[in-house]
Structure formats: C-alpha cells, structure tokens
C-alpha cells in the first residue's frame, strides 16, 4: 500500500490541480430545501369566454304548456319568441392555503445562483373554490309565466354554480439562473425567476373545470441564510400571467337557465340559452410567502465531509490506494484507484 507524508499529499494535490486548471475553480454550494408549514399561497385564476346567441322561454305547447314564454320589447307580440343577447361566461378559481414542496438552490459564485427541481403542491389537502357566472346583456323583453319585465339595463351577473379545486401544482419547466448577493457573512439577497407549469383541476356545477397546463414565472425574491451545512430561505414569489386565447367551445343548444325576474322581483323565469362561444382568455396570478429549510448536498469527492475538496481528501484517497476502504472509494466501485483520484481532482476547491 502506498503511504506518503502529508506534505507530499498537499504538494502533489496542488501540482495536479494547477496542471488541470482547477486551482482557482469555484465549487457551487447546493442546498436542498423543503417548504415549511408557515408558508402561504394565494392563487386566483379568471377565465372569460364570450357567448352570443338567443334566449327563449322553455314553453312548449305539447310538452310544457305552462312554461315560461318570452316576448320582445315593452308591448305587443305573442307566442314564444327568441331574444338576442351577448354575454361572457366567467370561471373564477381561488386558492388560499399553506403549500408543500421542495427545490434546490445553488450558489454558483460571482453573485450567481440557480434553482432546480422546484415542485409545489399548492393545495396541500386544502381544497380551493370555483365559481361560474354569466355576465349578460340583452334587449328589453317580457316573460309570461311568470309575468315580468326585463328592461335593458346593461350587464347583469347571473350565478351559474360553484365547485371546488381538487389539484393545483406548480412545477419548474426550465432553467432558472438568478443573483445571490452577499450582504453579510452567510447572508445573501436572492432574486431568481423560475419558469413553471401550473396545473389546476376541479369541478363546477357538476362539470370538470380544467384549463389545462398553464405557463408561468415565479419571481423568487428574498433572503438566504447559510450556517455551515444548513440554510434557511425566506422569499416572496409572484406570478401574473395571461391565459389563452383558447379554442372556442362547442355551440350551446337549449341550455336551461333560471333567471330571477326584474320587475317585479321574486320570481324565476325558466329560459333556454343557445349560442356560439368565442375564444377564451384570462389571467392567473400566484402570490407565495415562502419559508424553507435546507441542507447542503453532500459532494462524494468531499471524503472527510468538511465542506471542501482539498488536500485532506486527496490524502485519504492516496493513503487507501488499492484498498476497498468505503470512505475513500469515491465512486463506490469497490476499489480505491485512479477513478476516485480523478473525481477528487475534478471537484477541487
């Protein structure tokens, strides 16, 4: 077994590192973080879909002779006549909870940092809410059964149903390089934009409400504190991104809607809506107040576990040369040899 003096170990290490251009190479400090329970998230998604067409009472002389009839204008007319309208169908999804998740943050040197592997469960077992409403504009019309006047008064809001969000995640979708400026010993001001894909799944009025994967960017801004091999991170994160345009939905045919009467109030007109949808557009906003704790990733080349790869690690590898000593077998192939030496030198700090 080869045994050499500590001074020779250091001299050999320095010479090899210099020859390979490694003597001044900076090693990234990478910390694996877990989101803490005191973190909070607020997310609101609004999706608007234009719908234009006609509404008509559900009267039918054969099957529903006592149903509602619709007539245009203030006076006159007979039968059951269609009334033109324009509207927007709006879905609003809302989350207010304590998220769970994890990610890695690396200090790259030169005031640079990176975030990788970010995955957030935005619900963390607390469902969100979904509301569906119609913003309706129509020409003046009247109804029979019940007898009421619906004057044209601009846009009115009709609640169509409510539901819940059962899944909401944000998953990193690309590289995230930012800045980490040292403000004092072990403390850094962090600012990094993380591209994410936001997925929201729920139901409203018994129907699935899934806008599909939504692109977004989380801007993480806050303070990183490093103490030895542990770290804490306190950041805010915000994202405000457009949705769409999304392809139009299939046409609406005789969709029943219960419309509260206007003059007089207190009744309900049973109407059937038909129409054509336009492209859907909207926005999704996400605001996080994030607290996370982390620990530094272990570098296999840091044989003695002191946080740096240097002559002490090389000395251990050289002293165990040709053996199967687990602590010196960097690549864990059962033999301490040139492969382990190469790994240590390539990670030299």
Image (spheres, rainbow, N blue to C red):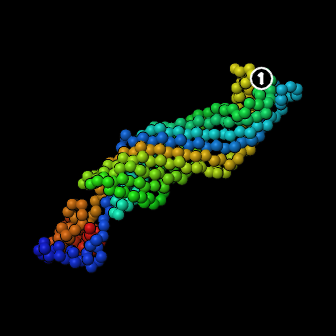
Q: Quadrant of the C terminus?
A: bottom left
* Residue found at the very far front of the displayed protein: 183
Number of numbered markers: 1
Confirm whether residue 182 shows in the render: yes
Left or right: where does residue 334 sit relative to residue 108?
left
**Residue, x 29% and y 73% (percent of image)?**
22
Residue under label 1: 148
Q: Residues within 10 Å of mark 1 (few under 14, many from 20)?
A: many
Indicate the position of residue 5 as horizontal and vertical percent values: 11, 74
Left or right: where does residue 245 sit relative to residue 269?
left
Assign a secondary structure to mark 1. strand
**Residue, x 72% and y 33% (percent of image)?**
154
Indicate the position of residue 126 as horizontal and vertical percent values: 45, 37
**Residue, x 45% and y 55% (percent of image)?**
193
Indicate the position of residue 55 as horizontal and vertical percent values: 77, 35
Q: Is residue 37 above or below residue 303?
A: above
Indicate the position of residue 243 as horizontal and vertical percent values: 59, 49
* Camera-nearest residue between 41 and 130: 41
Q: Which image quadrant is residue 150 in?
A: top right
Confirm whether residue 339 shows in the render: no
**Residue, x 44% and y 44% (percent of image)?**
288
Left or right: where does residue 334 sit relative to residue 207?
left
Q: Quadrant of the N terminus?
A: bottom left
């Amino acid at each position: 077994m080869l045994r050499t003096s500590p001074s020779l170990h250091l001299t050999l290490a320095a010479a090899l590192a210099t020859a390979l251009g490694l003597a001044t190479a900076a090693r990234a400090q990478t910390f694996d973080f877990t989101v803490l329970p005191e973190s909070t998230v607020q997310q609101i998604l609004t999706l608007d879909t234009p719908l234009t067409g006609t509404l008509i009472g559900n009267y039918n002389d054969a099957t529903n002779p006592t149903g509602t009839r619709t007539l245009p204008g203030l006076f006159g007319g007979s039968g059951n006549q269609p009334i033109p309208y324009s509207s927007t169908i709006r879905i609003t999804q809302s989350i207010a909870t304590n998220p769970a998740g994890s990610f890695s943050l690396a200090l790259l040197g030169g005031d640079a940092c990176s975030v990788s592997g970010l995955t957030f469960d935005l619900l963390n077992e607390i469902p969100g809410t979904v509301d569906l409403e119609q913003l309706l504009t129509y020409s003046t019309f009247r109804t029979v059964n019940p007898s009421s006047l619906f004057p044209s008064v601009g846009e009115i809001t009709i609640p169509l149903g409510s539901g819940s969000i059962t899944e909401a995640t944000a998953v990193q979708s690309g590289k995230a390089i930012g800045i980490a400026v040292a403000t004092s010993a072990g403390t850094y001001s962090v600012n990094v934009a993380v591209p994410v894909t936001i997925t929201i799944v729920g139901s409203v009025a018994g129907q699935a409400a899934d806008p599909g994967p939504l692109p977004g960017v989380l801007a993480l801004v806050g303070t990183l504190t490093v103490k030895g091999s542990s770290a804490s991170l306190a950041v805010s994160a915000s994202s405000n991104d457009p949705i769409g345009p999304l392809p139009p939905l299939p046409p609406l045919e005789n969709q029943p809607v219960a419309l509260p009467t206007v003059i007089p109030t207190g009744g309900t007109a049973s109407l059937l809506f038909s129409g054509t949808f336009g492209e859907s557009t909207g926005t999704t906003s996400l605001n996080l107040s994030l607290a996370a704790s982390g620990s530094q990733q272990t570098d296999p080349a840091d044989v003695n576990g002191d946080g740096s790869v240097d002559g002490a690690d090389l000395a251990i590898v050289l002293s165990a040369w040709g053996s199967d000593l687990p602590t010196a077998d960097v690549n864990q192939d059962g033999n301490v040899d040139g492969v382990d030496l190469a790994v240590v030198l390539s990670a030299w700090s």
